[in-house]
Image (cartoon, helix red, strand yellow):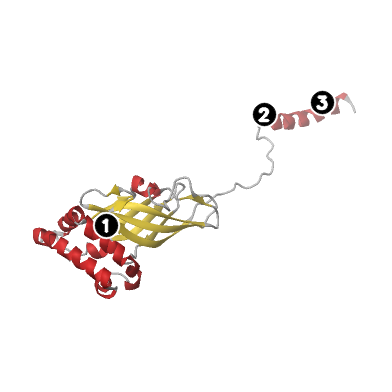
Amino acid sequence: MSPLRTLAALAVVLPVAAGALFGSTACPVDSAPPIIVEERADLRVDDVIAQRVISGIEATEGRIFIVVTVTLSNAGDSLVFVDPAQFTLENEDGTVVASAPIATAALADACSADVAAVAGRSVSCSVAFENDVGQIPAIVHYAGIAGATDTALVTPTVDGLQCLFFVPPSPATECYGTCVATNCDVEVNTFLGACEMCFPQCGAGEESCFCVRESCGPECAASSEDFDRCANDCVDACF
């Protein structure tokens, strides 16, 4: 090859080599399309109960713990975490309550920031919220760290504390709940122990509380009457 052709060949090869070494875009090459990782979550509420005490942790005066068991399914590509801080509880009046981290951590099946569902799988766990007595939970919200959001309606089943704290809506509701929580510990615990197996049989709502009290055996009926006697003073004081 003549010296001139050699120089011409080098004039073509050297810029390409330099581009490979130093990142020049003078000679574009084909590249794979970017991988888009999407976070999507489907939220379901499995159970809702009210508890005044969780593993020795008492709710603040005038408040009660609402424990929500959820299932979060990963409908996307990235990990979906179940950090309790990612859940909020909306009440029927529109107020929104953040999760209670200490009470949540005391639950046997607590949601945790260290747990996540991989793509196509789900995680079930529980989150505690500290709610004002008399508030009615309506919606659980989930907000993922990468933008996923979902909501699920709260459809609570009847439990002992719902029955014990049931009173017609009024400004005195909070007074009544606080009074009972302060003065009727023995009666509340006895009622829960005697009637717990009956709660799932009676559905939800005011009628279900009457169902529990009237249809679930003599021990349950007797403990309900004991609670009523204790609670009468609170009714007289608050209504």
Return the mark for residue 94. Answer: 1
Q: Compared to 137, does 143 lie above or below?
A: above
Mark closest to the chain's N terminus, 3 or 1: 3
Q: Amino acid at mark 2?
A: Phe
Mark closest to the chain's N terminus, 2 or 1: 2
Mark closest to the chain's N terminus, 3 or 2: 3
Distance from Cα at disc 2 to Cα at disc 1:
58 Å
Q: Position of residue 83 (x, y in %)?
A: 43, 48
**Image check: 156 left or right of 164?**
right
Question: Looking at the image, can residue 167 be seen?
Answer: no
At horizontal 33% and vertical 60% (from top left) the residue drawn is 49
Contact? badges 3 and 1 (CB < 8 Å): no
Q: Amino acid at mark 1?
A: Gly
Circle 2 packing at 10 Å, graded few (<14), some (14-19), many (20+), is few
Circle 3 packing at 10 Å, graded few (<14), some (14-19), many (20+), is few
List the residue tagged with mark 2: 22
List the residue tagged with mark 3: 7
**Image check: 13 left or right of 195?**
right
Question: Looking at the image, can residue 124 be seen?
Answer: yes
Return the mark for residue 29. Answer: none
At horizontal 53% and vertical 55% (from top left) the residue drawn is 76
Q: Position of residue 72 (x, y in %)?
A: 46, 57
Residue 221 placement: quadrant: bottom left
Q: Amino acid at mark 3?
A: Leu
At horizontal 29% and vertical 62% (from top left) the residue drawn is 192
Distance from Cα at disc 3 to Cα at disc 1:
78 Å
**Image check: 220 left or right of 235?**
right
Q: Nearer the viewer, residue 12 or 167?
A: 167
